[in-house]
Each structure stands twice: as C-alpha cells, then as structure tokens.
Amino acid sequence: MYENTFDPLMAAIDAAAGVDVLGLHPAALLDRLDGLETAKRRLEAVQAVTICEIDTQDLASAAGFRTTAALLLFRLGWSPRTARARVRTADATTPVHSPTGTPTPAPYPRLAALMSTGTASGEQAPSRRRRRPGRADRW
C-alpha cells in the first residue's frame, strides 16, 4: 500500500481557489498568475517522474493498452497529442535503470532541473523519444 501525500496539495489548491481576485491590484494579479504557472510546471516535473515509472514498469501492457500514451489518454482523458507529449517529456527528463540495474541518466537533465523549479515547461522537451535500455521503441 502507499501513503496518500496529496491531501496537503489539495488543501493548497483549495486555498488558492478560494482567493477572491475581483479588485486585486494588477501587480497582485500578475504575481498570482506567475505563481500558478510555477506551481503547474513543478507538478508537471513530478508527474513526469511518475509517467516514466509507469512506462518503465510497462503498466500499459498489463492494463491492455498498446502504449503508455494510450493508457494516459484513457485514464486521464488527455488528447492523443497531449498524452504522447507527456510521455516524451517524461522520457527526456527522467533517469531510468536498465534491466541489469545500470542507471541511464536523463537525456535532458537541465530541462528536468528547470522544470522542478518551475522555470521551464515540459513543452520544451524534444519531439523524439530515446530508446529505453532493454525495451523496443513502440512509437
């Protein structure tokens, strides 16, 4: 079993959603927009690690899907383009281990670091996937 660590995150989202923005000073509105975008990008980095592990464990096949992108499309309701882009982002920014346990660094560690601080988006990931050690490329 796993521990649900999302309660504090959901409480923070509820608090942000509860702020009345009507009449806020323009600078405060822009600061809020910047903060929301930074938070979204940081969450995207956390999500990329999760998607990479889903791909590494081949959970899509176990669930009857041909690709991880197909699983994401079904489970999260994303468009095919978004699902494929998120898998590419995960692939580009997350280190993996080969079947023998040898670590393979992320191809774009700088992008991963920038995403984790919220200063870059996964939209800046490359458009091609790397081959996973020990797995055929199914794209």
Image: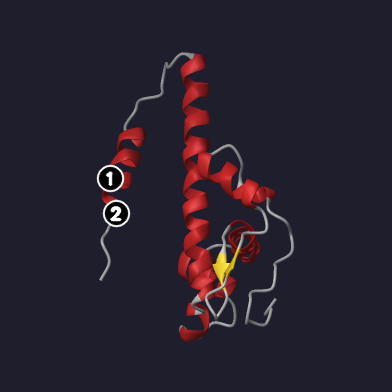
Count of residue discs? 2
| Residue at figure coordinates x 28%, y 45% from the top left | 8
| Of 83 and 22, the residue lying toward us | 83
Can you tell which mark lies on residue 8?
A: 1
Which residue is under mark 2?
A: 5
Where residue 30 sits in the image (x, y, percent)? 53, 23
Protein image colouring: secondary structure
Q: Check whether the beta carbons of the residues at disc 2 and disc 1 lie within 8 A of each other.
A: yes
Report how far apart the C-alphas of labels 2 and 1 lie in the structure: 7 Å
Q: Residue 23 sits in which quadrant?
A: top left
Q: 10 Å neighbourhood of mark 1: few (<14), some, or many (≥20)?
A: few
Where residue 101 sits in the image (x, y, percent)? 52, 75
Where residue 53 sits in the image (x, y, percent)? 49, 68
Q: Name the quadrant of the C terminus.
A: bottom right
Can you tell which mark lies on residue 106?
A: none
| Residue at figure coordinates x 67%, y 82% from the top left | 136
| Residue at figure coordinates x 74%, y 64% from the top left | 128
Is 133 rendered above or below residue 110? below
Q: Residue 88 sits in which quadrant?
A: bottom right
Where residue 59 sits in the image (x, y, percent)? 48, 78
Tell me the amino acid under the disc marked 1: Pro
| Residue at figure coordinates x 52%, y 84% from the top left | 61
Q: Is residue 105 left or right of residue 24?
A: right
Q: Name the quadrant of the N terminus.
A: bottom left
Helix, strand, or loop for circle 2? loop
Q: 10 Å neighbourhood of mark 2: few (<14), some, or many (≥20)?
A: few
Helix, strand, or loop for circle 1? helix
Is 108 rendered above or below residue 52? above
Q: Is residue 57 left or right of residue 7?
A: right
Is 32 rendered above or below residue 103? above
Tell me the amino acid under the disc marked 2: Thr
| Of 128 and 130, the residue lying toward us | 130
